[in-house]
Amino acid sequence: MIRPVLRMGNPRLLEVAQAVSVCPSPALDALVADLLDTMRHLDGAGLAAPQIGVSQRVVVFEVKSNPRYPEAAPIPLTVLVNPVITPLADEQVEDWEGCLSVPGLRGRVPRYRHVRYTGTDQFGEPIDRTVSGFHARVVQHECDHLDGILYPRRMHDLEYFGFEGEVAALRAQTEQG
């Protein structure tokens, strides 16, 4: 079922989500189905349970052919329960991000280039991946939602934050140089 996505300003987006204690479960399966339906309907690269008002440490992400991220490398469908992210180096890179909870806006956000993430899938099977680039950015962005953090709080320079159409020239400049 496609669910409404909470938008920036809703206090529920600022809460730390609760760990999933029973995995697998019918309730978790239903939550994952709703997350995937909603993410795909809105052409998102990922979605976290708090974004649909559920305080659970669950994120989903996937990139195939996505009109919001046309140059992005594919990311396999991932359901990640109770994730832990570990940066593999101190190096961070800034790049443009958007968010279904911050619709119509984009900003340049620093993220770790290389991370390891662990957790389980919705069936309780362990996940342990080392990733970099856009994949690393997506998992960090989605897991931030589990700790009540929206990407504008990560930004260093609000000069690079604005409505998608208005920052197009800035995006082109930063992507070229």
Image (cartoon, grey):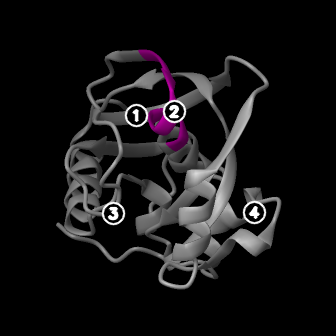
Question: Measuring 55% from the left and 85% from the top, which residue is drawn there?
Answer: 166
Label 2 with label 4: CB-CB less than 8 Å: no
What element does badge 2 sit on? helix
Q: Which residue is mark 2?
A: 133
Q: Which residues are magenta?
A: 128-137
- The residue type indicated by label 2 comes to Gly
Q: Nearer the viewer, residue 11 or 145?
A: 145
Mark pair 4, 3: CA separation: 22 Å
Q: Which residue is mark 4?
A: 153
What element does badge 4 sit on? helix
Position of the N terminus by quadrant: bottom left
4 or 1: mark nearer the eye? 4
Asked whether, in this view, residue 151 is left or right of residue 65, the answer is: right
- The residue type indicated by label 3 comes to Arg
- The residue type indicated by label 1 comes to Leu
Q: Could you tell which of marks 2 and 1 lies nearer the N-terminus?
A: 1
